[in-house]
Image: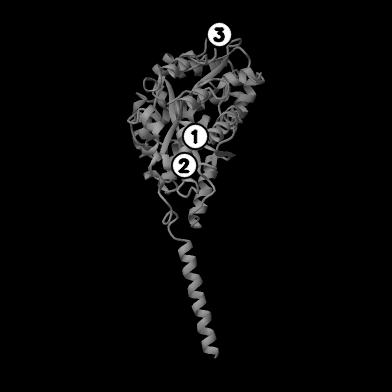
Amino acid sequence: MIRGFIMRILSMMVFFTLLLLSACGEPTANKTDWTNKNWKEIESNAEDTTVRMFMWGGDEGINQYIDEWIVPRLKKSYDITLERIPMDTPEILQKLQTEKQAGKQDGTIDIIWINGENFKNAKENELLLGSFTGVLPNYNEYYQTEDPAFLTDFGTPVEGMEAPWGKVQFVFHCDTAKIEKPPRSFAELKSWIHENPGKFTYPRAKDFSGNAFLRHVLYAQAEQPSDIFNRPLQEEKISNTADRTWEYLNDIEPDLWRSGDHYPDNLTELDRLYSQGEVWMTMGYNESRAEALIEEGVFPRTTRSFVMEPGSIGNTHFLSIPFNSSNQPGALTAINFMLSPEAQLAKYKPDYWGENTPISMDKIPEEIQKEFHAVERGESVLPTKKLEESFLPESEASYVEWMKEQWFNEVVQK
């Protein structure tokens, strides 16, 4: 009798173990792959669903564009409820990694705003759905799908795992009431800093904008910027360029704000210093970002943007879908809508966001082309021709982490 009881217990343990192993199997093993479905079927299955979009939430204009323009139109046209969840991208990836390790098939994230090193990490750790751009009607109709800017992301092959949502260029901002002629090169910037001690600084290397500033300095110290952006990171081959970069940064440090004893932790802190007049320049990875801040009274009305030789680094940012999205049809439909000419036009206008668009002008309807051309981006925004002439591609993602570590070792601790 006891033996029979023990056998029943063992049988139950085996049963529950098998259930557990089944639950912890491949996250997408039993899920429908919607990337191969008919588009009408996808849209039909997206109706009356909720899509959870996780994205960086540090810009109020961007948040308003999503909440006030995208959300009501998705609801009206597709009966999709879009929920915007603000979270820093590395935290999003950590959340996905945790769900993957737990074997969670129905995840809590449907869309991610992503690019650069975060995309590389997500791809390498298999946190993304896979190739999906081939099924998006708007992408294939209105975008130059073979554009190199869409095929690689900071040097990482995209392979259809993310859809281009926007593109931006790095610019500097200055108060023209205080600076009549901004520097035209990094050599002139160094001279200006020494002539105006305490009136310039930049964010730390861990900050996205601060790291971009430092990569601009790296480009400027190379024989040609292409020596950096066209090559994978090999420290021994860029050692001379790196040495000149640290020499430049250490040379300007004593004449930075607070004599370089403290660097702003992020762009928000630098913007605050600029708005208070403590420094006379700020910067950012969006050529039109000053417009909204001017209108809000944060930046002075005499704020203008400028770029310096050898050029301005620009990149494309993307939308992607996690490996375990519980609403693939809704995510696909929402992304397709956000890539539409109408949504891109609204994003291009300075009312909310004002950033540039990756859409191909020659592929969109003529009446929308005219609307794009009629948009007044604002006095602080450089002419499109000037931005295009100064455009420099991003280096591969490994330069970002390398810069964080080396800047700390070679500048902060010196």
Q: Are marks 1 and 2 in contact (CB under 8 Å)?
A: no
Q: Which residue is mark 2?
A: 44
Distance between the alpha carbons at the discs numbered 1 and 2:
51 Å
Residue ID at (55%, 33%): 76
Residue ID at (45%, 48%): 323
Distance between the alpha carbons at the discs numbered 2 and 3:
58 Å
Which disc, if any, is residue 19? none
Q: Which residue is mark 3?
A: 180
Q: Which residue is mark 1?
A: 407
Q: Position of residue 393 (x, y in %)?
A: 39, 27
Task: Name which residue type carries label 1.
Answer: Trp
Q: In the figure, residue 271 lies in which quadrant?
A: top right
Give the camera-side residue of 341 and 183.
Answer: 341
Q: Is residue 81 left or right of residue 307?
A: right
Q: Position of residue 268 (x, y in %)?
A: 61, 29
Q: In the figure, residue 283 lies in which quadrant?
A: top right
Q: Is residue 401 visible?
A: no
Give the mark toward the camera: 2 or 3. Answer: 2
Does 157 sit above or below residue 144? below
Task: Name which residue type carries label 3.
Answer: Glu
